[in-house]
Image (spheres, rainbow, N blue to C red):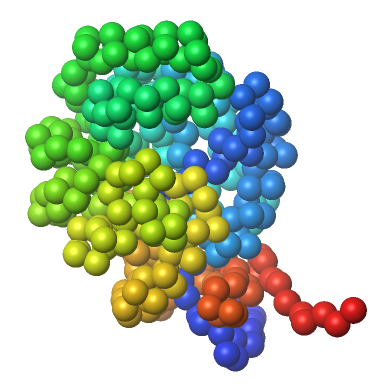
Amino acid sequence: MDETHIDATGLFVLPGMIDIHTDAIEKEVQPRPGAQFAMDIAFRELERRMVSNGITMAYHSLSMSGGEGIRGNRLIEEVVQGLRAARESRTLMRHRVHLRYELSNTSGRPLANALIREGMVDLLSLMDHSPGQGQFKNTGNYANYVLKTYGAEGVLALTKVQEMERLRADRTWDELEPLARQALAANIRIASHDDDVCEKIDIMQSLGVTISEFPINLQAAHYAMSKQMYVSVGAPNVVRGGSHTQNLNAREAIQVGAANIICSDYHPPSMLAAVFQLVQDGTYLSEAVNFVTLHPAQAAGIDEQYGSIQVGKRADFILVERYDDLPVVRSTIIDGEVVYEANYQLLHE
């Protein structure tokens, strides 16, 4: 094998970041409600953004919530098929599918079963975004979510709220036991979403869940960690210093040992910035880096090949410069090949 020499003088050499929850593809496919772009255009643009931010593997979070638009069953199937086709062609980075299944979406269950059976899913999460619990204990917050996601407001938003309240009254987590069992049989890790009480975490663990995504409060985060679950928080929460929905403060959770994974959630550029924010808060760099590399690899069950710079593992790493107290990706290397490089210059005009 030919040797490749890369000059990393003055730069940090870090493992490539593994993002186990990113909604970014939704905004590329459908940047506004009703405005949809072709999958090949969206995919190519997104991976350029990802590698420029040091993300070498992304678990694209596709939300099967039913209804219309980017989170509807029909479009989800199209996006998953598009991701699979793209993975089998030339790519800049590693792509995985994180299927997010909504408890109320009974019509989508056959599709979820089929996608798992056909090997299209790499991570599964179980969700309940209905109003009155989780992150939407305040019904007004749910109405804002409906507006942001579906472009519905006024009477349409109220109708959606009432529909979700009715569906939630008819649904129980036990219904998802066959889906969870199928995922586990296919060696797919399962995550829960928006855990708010200890009782829900117990239910999730009984279904085989080993990752708690975005717990709503510190008590839930601590409890999930005590049950030997991985706890994932959002990088934007870390960078901004708090939740935009006034839920768990990610920095506080990390400082008290109640979280061990950082994902990009809705803002990929925050991943690397979150690492250096932790360093600024007093965390050792190696420990901070593990939140976006080794720990997510362990949670996803891929740490034998990914998540650290180590003999025998895949050669995915990034070169990072710290400039004006901000981290800047200078190079992204995947399987030993440079897929992104930026040479910043001080211009005098």
Residue 298 visible from this viewpoint? no
Residue 346's x, y, as percent? Answer: 77, 82
In the figure, 107 relative to 78: above or below? above
Along the viewing direction, whichever of 133 and 114 lies nearer the viewer: 133
In the figure, 333 relative to 66: above or below? below
Q: Is residue 12 left or right of residue 344?
A: left
Say which residue appears at 59% left-offset and 55% top-offset: 50
Residue 185's x, y, as percent? Answer: 25, 36
Residue 124 visible from this viewpoint? yes
Along the viewing direction, whichever of 226 and 333 lies nearer the viewer: 226
Say which residue appears at 50% left-offset and 13% top-offset: 154
In the picture, the quarter occupied by the C terminus is bottom right
Q: Is residue 38 left or right of residue 67?
A: right
Residue 285's x, y, as percent? Answer: 37, 79
Say which residue appears at 25% left-offset and 23% top-offset: 132
Say which residue appears at 47% left-offset and 34% top-offset: 62
In the picture, the quarter occupied by the N terminus is bottom right
